[in-house]
Image (cartoon, rainbow, N blue to C red):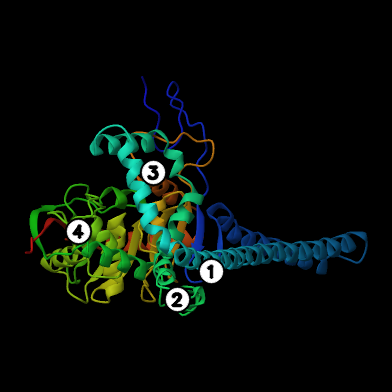
Amino acid sequence: MATPDPVRGTDPASGSSTTPPSPLIVRSGRSTLVATDVLLAHLPQLDAFADAIESDAHRIAVLGLDTPPGALRSELERCEMTGLDLADQVRTLRRAIAIAQSSYELGERSVMSLQDAASAWSTGTLARLALPLLPLLGAGGVLVWNRLPGTDAQKKAVLQRWLLDHPEVVTSPEFATLVRRVVSNTDDAVLGASGLPPWVSMVLGEQGLGILGVQTSAGVLIAAGSASPGRAFHETPVRVERVSETATPTPPAGAEQRLERVPAEDQVRIERYTAPGEPPRYVVYVAPTQTFSPIAGDEPWDLTSNVAGVAGLPAGSIRATEQAMADAGIAPDSEVVLVGFSQGGLVADAVAASGNWNTVGLETYGDPGGGIELPEGIHGVAVRHSDDFVVATGGAQQATDRTIVERRAYPEGSAIPTDLPVPAHQRRAYAETARLLDAAGSPEVRAQLDALDALTHDYTGREGSQITTFSYRAERVPTR
């Protein structure tokens, strides 16, 4: 039996796509620009079209000056005026599209802000009212779980199988929005349960002073985990080992090839680019989460690092990556491009935000690092799926100079795979988006991708240049 394509819904018999890919939505830097890549690609064409019409109108005017008075000259003058009027109409259309893009983004932000404020208010209120019922609810949950047939392991296996068989439950923009609100409102629930009125969390939250938010929610989770018997989300020291050093013949070209170089086994891959007479440049690729256990073991790319990273704390994976960077010879003033997928993107965001490194490019895929505030001047792309709830665990997107590219990995009507959990977060889904990114035509996207390519291709185009690749493995150091 043929296996359906996991990225696009495909017909197993013919292999042809049954659902066209959803469009790339581009959000440009700190501005209010938002539109599909196709629409943005047409704006420069409208400018060029208006300029060409105006140029032709002026040529007609010159012809009219050399034409004797009469019917022909009058016709040329009429054509000139028509051309100039058409050029104005094209420019007006271009301005109207730009205004509509900005208005859409402003409207969307306003609606989201109102919904978030209402969510924070209701969460605090419900938490305060439900506090006396928590023991009863907890006991009820335990009772229901215990009455289910089978051992705990069998019950978990049944739940996992059900989620795999029904991927649509967790694969939608609506579910991602729900997750973002839950993780952002955890601190609101704690404040409400403590008896404080809802307006306190409103003033301190993301819609007010910005003191509370997803980082404090993650901090609450860490505090609760540390108090648990197994000490969940407890950070440890890490140690890093270089496992290989090889020569690499060519640099990556485009987003898809950079995503391919993000390691799957070793956690960090670093490429050093050298050219005669020039300081070395580096590209650092950071791996995704390797284990989802909330209890820290040997693996630093775990759930503990995810939560600590979202909380803005020095997670084990972040510290390990910086140790690897130092071992590879990266100095504070060395030009560095950071590329990461999933937790690797969160690590890349945190490293860039630290200010300890000269980050000249940042490219992430499916990362929950939206709540990390980056310094101005760091360019690149952040690629996310609107139906990927893992991205939502990082909270609302902070202002950034990067171009944010978003699409729905599995639009309505497409076949959602059932072989792996959270299909919209899988690497193969982001690989499809990276391919679409490389084919993008909008100036905003092209400028960022071309700049990332130029940082490495500039060196490799020179005689005597070299690419050396270092791979690293890290592990946690147990503590008493």
Residue 458 appearing in the image: no
- Identify the residue under disc 4: 271
State the separation of the CA atoms marked 2 and 1.
Answer: 16 Å
In the rendered image, the quadrant that contains the N terminus is: top left
As helix, strand or loop, the secondary structure at mark 2 comes to loop
Marks 2, 4: nearer the viewer: 2
- Identify the residue under disc 1: 117
Q: Residues within 10 Å of mark 4 (few under 14, many from 20)?
A: many
**Residue 252 on image: x %, y %:** 28, 52
The answer to whether 211 is drawn above or below residue 303 in the figure is below
State the residue lying farthest toward the right: 70
Label 3 sits on what residue type? Ala
- Identify the residue under disc 3: 429
Q: Earlier in the sequence, mark 2 or mark 1?
A: 1
**Residue 117 on image: x %, y %:** 53, 69
State the separation of the CA atoms marked 3 and 1.
Answer: 32 Å
Q: Are marks 3 and 1 in contact (CB under 8 Å)?
A: no
**Residue 151 on image: x %, y %:** 24, 35
State the separation of the CA atoms marked 2 and 4.
Answer: 52 Å
- Identify the residue under disc 2: 196
